Image (cartoon, helix red, strand yellow):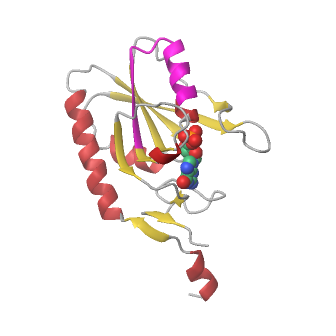
Amino acid sequence: MTLAEQAATPRVLISPERLQERVAQLADEINRDYADTQMLSCIGVLKGSVFFMTDLLKQITVPLTVDFFQTASYGPNKTPGEVRIRKDIDLSVKGKDVLLIEDIVDTGHTLRTVLALLEFRGARSVKLCALLDKKAKREVKIEVDYYGFEVEPVFVVGYGLDDAELFRNLPYIGVVDN
Ligand code: 5GP
C-alpha cells in the first residue's frame, strides 16, 4: 500500500465487533418494546442507514415491512434546516407503528422533517432509531428512542456513511484525518 493510500484510510473509531454487539443490544430492546405489535413499519433514510438497517432488522422478530425515504438539503450551499424529500416511501403509514431508522442524527433537521410528514400522514406511533447521535450539534429538539453510540462533532464515515459517496462499505465507523 502506498503512503497516499494509507493516509486515505479512515482511522477506526468504532470497530466492527463493537458495532455488531451494540446492534444486537438495540434489536433486543426493540423486540422487547414491540413484542405485542402486529406489524412494524420500518423506514430507513437512504443511503446511509442501509448497512445498519439490514444488520438490525435481521435480528427483529416482530412481523415488519421495509420502506425508504431519501432526503437532501436544498440549494447549492445545502442550507441546514431546509430538507427536501427526494424519494418518498411506497407504503401507507396510516394507523401504523413506525420505526424510523437513521444512520446519524446531527442537527436534527432531517429527522424533524420526516417525523412531521409521518405524523401528518396519520402514523399511529413513530419511534426513532439512529446508530449514531452527535448530540453536541443538535439545532432542533429531537427525541431519539434508540441510539447506538454518541459521537463527538467530527465527520465520520463507514458502515453506510460516506464522504463524497466513498467509504460506505467500511465495516467500521471511522474518521478521516486530514
Ligand atoms: P441532520 O439533518 O441531523 O443535520 O443530518 C443528518 C444527515 O447528515 C445524516 O443522515 C447524514 O447523511 C449526514 N451527516 C451528518 N453528520 C455526518 C457525518 O459525520 N458523516 C457523514 N458521512 N454524514 C453525516
User: Left of 79 or right of it: where is 122?
Assistant: left
Say above or below: 7 vs 105.
below
Depth check: 12 or 79 in front?
Answer: 79
Which residue is located at x 19 percent, y 32 percent?
A: 32
Depth check: 142 or 33 in front?
Answer: 142
* x, y percent for residue 162: 58, 56
Depth check: 3 or 79 in front?
Answer: 79
* x, y percent for residue 20: 30, 56
Q: Is residue 127 magenta?
A: yes
User: Left of 40 or right of it: where is 171?
Assistant: right
Which quadrant would the C terminus be assigned to in this image?
Answer: bottom right
Q: Which residues are magenta?
A: 112-130
Which residue is located at x 51 percent, y 20 percent?
A: 118
Name of the residue lying farthest toward the right: 76
Which quadrant would the N terminus be assigned to in this image?
Answer: bottom right
* x, y percent for residue 131: 40, 47
Tally of numbered discs: 0
Q: Is residue 164 magenta?
A: no
* Residue 46 can be seen, yes or no: no
